[in-house]
Amino acid sequence: MPKPLEVSLISDTEIRIVRAFDAPAALVFRAWSEPALVQRWLSGPPGWRFTRCEIDARLGGEYRFAWANEAGVEFGLTGVYSEIDPPTRWVSVEQFEGAPTKSTVTTELVETNGVTNSVMTLAYESKEARDRALQSGMTDGMEHGYKQLDAVLTEEQA
């Protein structure tokens, strides 16, 4: 069973998030880049549903995700891949709907003996933007999704 994600502040504007997955890097990459797999784990917290999942996982390709809750509240996330090197690394610039700033997200997958460490670095435009992201409950939501991703990876390897 993987440990919960590890969060560290590596500069005034950056957050590093590390999480291990019991699966090879190629499968972890697929689970983050193929809409049919992403929809199975990135559903959001209880009471939310995934309403949009579009991914064009190539250099210059875009992704769009949207969620809605039972009260009709909606939010979305868009991004553009500025670098992609399957199955070990991708970089994108993303923005949540209504957020005043964008962030650059660098994700690296490092596989050792069938376990893949995801090392994600989120670079924000300012310390204030970084702090707003942390205060939003972002990491709690990520861990919720990663637990669901663990289940998807297990099912895909069965």
Image: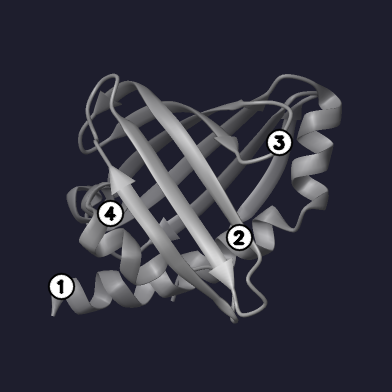
**In the rendering, which numbered label is found on residue 28?**
4
Sequence-wise, the earlier of marks 2 and 3 is 2
Q: Horizontal and vertical percent for residue 79?
A: 45, 32
| Residue type of the residue flagged with mark 1 | Gln
**In the rendering, which numbered label is found on residue 74?**
2
Question: What colour-coding does the image apply?
Answer: one colour
Q: Do callouts 3 and 1 mark residues in contact (Cβ within 8 Å)?
A: no
Residue 101 found in image quarter: top right
| Residue type of the residue flagged with mark 4 | Val
> Disc 3 to disc 1, how far (Cα)?
37 Å
| Front label number (2 vs 3) | 2
> Disc 2 to disc 4, how far (Cα)?
27 Å
Q: Horizontal and vertical percent for residue 103?
A: 61, 27
| Front label number (3 vs 1) | 3
Q: Do callouts 2 and 3 mark residues in contact (Cβ within 8 Å)?
A: no
Q: Do callouts 1 and 2 mark residues in contact (Cβ within 8 Å)?
A: no
Sequence-wise, the earlier of marks 1 and 2 is 2
Q: Do callouts 4 and 1 mark residues in contact (Cβ within 8 Å)?
A: no
Any part of residue 114 in sight: no
**In the rendering, which numbered label is found on residue 157?**
1
* Quadrant holding the C terminus: bottom left
For label 1, the SS is helix
> Disc 1 to disc 2, how far (Cα)?
33 Å
Above or below, comparing residue 77 to residue 21 in the picture: above
> Disc 4 to disc 3, how far (Cα)?
28 Å
Any part of residue 97 in sight: yes
